[in-house]
């Protein structure tokens, strides 16, 4: 009887884990805080890069997040390096990138900037922007 309960409990736990993981994106890239050294290393390696000029209080940035999460979960973006620049606390970096406001997305392919958008919340155009980094 005890063995049967253990087996049953194991099956229930395994089923719960399997059900939960099916709702989690496969391997969504996550943004890391901007670091000049990490950014330069990614550029020198020729990596595809997304720089997000972001503010926690920004409603447009909040609208961009689920779109970026969905798009970057696509396996074609598995090598994409995502750097988040805090608009309020990293003003010199914001200025370095020539950003005028938060919700600015900038893509690079190695050393070269490939494109940017400001205030965009359309999945199709954000996808097209990310594709420029590949």
Image: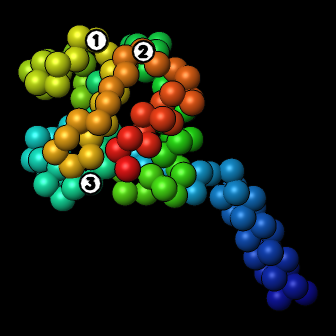
* Dot 2 or dot 3, earlier in sequence: 3
Q: Nearer the viewer, residue 91 or 96?
A: 96
* Dot 1 or dot 2, earlier in sequence: 1
The answer to whether marks 2 and 3 mark residues whose Cβ atoms lie closer than 8 Å is no
User: Where does residue 106 sit, x and y in percent of width and height?
Assistant: 30, 30
16 horizontally vs 64: left or right? right
Depicted 131 relative to depicted 6: above or below:
above
* Dot 3 or dot 1, earlier in sequence: 3
Closer to viewer: mark 3 or mark 1: 3
Q: In which quarter of the view is residue 103 placed? A: top left
User: Where does residue 4 sit, x and y in percent of width and height?
Assistant: 87, 85
Give the residue at mark 1: 101
Q: Nearer the viewer, residue 78 or 31?
A: 78
The answer to whether marks 1 and 2 mark residues whose Cβ atoms lie closer than 8 Å is yes
Give the residue at mark 2: 119
Mark 3, residues whose alpha carbon is within 10 Å: few (<14), some, or many (≥20)? some
Give the residue at mark 3: 47
4 horizontally vs 89: left or right? right
Depicted 78 relative to depicted 116: above or below:
below
Q: In which quarter of the view is residue 45 placed? A: bottom left
Residue 91, can we see it?
Answer: yes
User: Where does residue 1 sit, x and y in percent of width and height?
Assistant: 90, 87
**Residue at x 57%, y 30% (from the top left corner):** 124
């Amino acid at each position: 009887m005890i063995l049967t309960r253990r087996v049953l409990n194991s099956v229930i736990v395994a089923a719960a884990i399997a059900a939960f993981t099916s709702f989690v994106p496969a391997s969504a890239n996550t943004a890391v805080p901007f670091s000049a050294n990490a950014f330069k290393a990614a550029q020198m390696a020729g990596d595809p890069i997304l720089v997000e000029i972001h503010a926690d209080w920004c409603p447009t940035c909040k609208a961009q997040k689920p779109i970026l999460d969905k798009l970057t979960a696509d396996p074609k973006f598995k090598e994409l390096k995502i750097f988040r620049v805090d608009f309020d606390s990293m003003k010199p970096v914001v200025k370095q990138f020539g950003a005028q406001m938060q919700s600015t997305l900038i893509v690079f392919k190695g050393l070269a900037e490939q494109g940017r958008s400001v205030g965009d919340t359309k999945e199709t155009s954000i996808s097209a922007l990310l594709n420029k980094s590949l």
